[in-house]
Amino acid sequence: MSVKLKALVFDAYGTLFDVHSVVRLCDEFWPGQGTALSQLWRTKQLEYTWQRSLMRRYKDFSDVTVDGLRYACAALGLSLSELQVTRLREAYLSLTTFPEVKEALGKLSHLQLAILSNGAPSMLDPVVANAGLRGVFSAVISVDPLNTYKPTPDVYQLAVKRLGVPKNEIGFVSSNCWDACGAKSFGFRTFWINRSDAPVDRLDAAPDHVIRNLAELPDLV
Ligand code: 2OP
């Protein structure tokens, strides 16, 4: 019988907020290239977080996100102006939530809810507010003070410290399987939102629960 959860901690990008909601703006800048650019941009953004953590050369997620954009445009042969960088950096501050998110969070309000994200504080506060989620979370926690990224165990410890809840009473929710595995390896009960029917990452710490979207979560906690 698993312990009753006292808190749920959510990943931000890809879990609550759709990073690909910038595709429309990308298509406006580079017609027909939006989807390919957004996917390569996201892939590179995450790769850079893992590589910078290993290199111990941290810089915040806002700048790493722009570095990923610059790489993706260069790789696809797309010219990128500084005005377009500014517009796309701003677009990241008003990403849309996935359709089921707000209703699901409303059904989970009996638990302490928090965000734990690679995002810099300068990104997380506006994206939460612009999505109309201000006040939903008792804490919005960025990795930034640690100068490293997920899935470093110290990152997940930030949530234990901030919430004052033992790790075995915290549920962690992410659509990024590697993030859910990192949280499982740390000691949280984990829920992987498998939006794309992907296989589980082979990291010897498989998520406890696999669900298609957040609507399935209230029945599990
Ligand atoms: C986040 O930390 C992993 O990008 C994801 O929000």
Image (cartoon, rainbow, N blue to C red):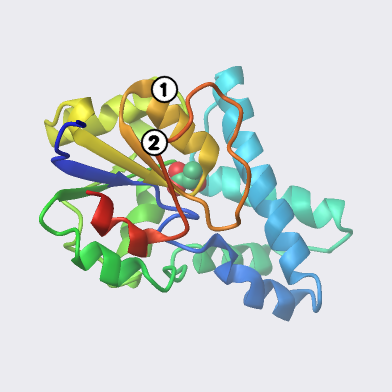
Residue plotted at (39% across, 28% down): 184
- Is residue 150 visible in the rendered image? The answer is no
| Lateral position of residue 112 relative to residue 9, left or right | left
**In the image, residue 160 lies at what x, y percent?**
21, 29
- The front one of 19 and 165 is 165
Circle 1/circle 2 CB separation < 8 Å: no
Identify which residue is drawn at 60% across, 54% down.
197
Residue 176: image x %, image y %? 52, 44
The outermost residue toward the right is 77
Q: Position of residue 68 (x, y in %)?
A: 67, 47
Residue 185: mark in rendering = 1
- The label shown at residue 208 is 2
Label 2 amino acid? Asp
Residue type at mark 1: give it. Answer: Ser
How far is disc 1 from disc 2 in space, using C-alphas?
Answer: 11 Å
Q: Quadrant of residue 127?
A: bottom left
Q: Quadrant of the N terminus?
A: top left
Numbered circles on residues, count: 2
| Circle 2 SS class | loop
Query: Badge 2, how many Cα within 10 Å: few under 14, some, many 20+?
Result: some
Callout 1: helix, strand or loop?
A: helix
Which residue: 63% across, 27% down? 51
The mark nearer the N terminus, 1 or 2, is 1
The relative height of residue 17 versus residue 102 in the rendered view (above or below) is above
Foreground tag (1 vs 2) = 2
Residue 200 to residue 196: above or below? above
Q: Is mark 2 within 8 Å of ligand 1?
A: no
Dot 1 alpha-carbon crowd within 10 angstroms: few under 14, some 14 to 19, many 20 or more? some
Percent x, y for residue 45?
62, 44
State the residue at coordinates (64%, 77%). Answer: 24
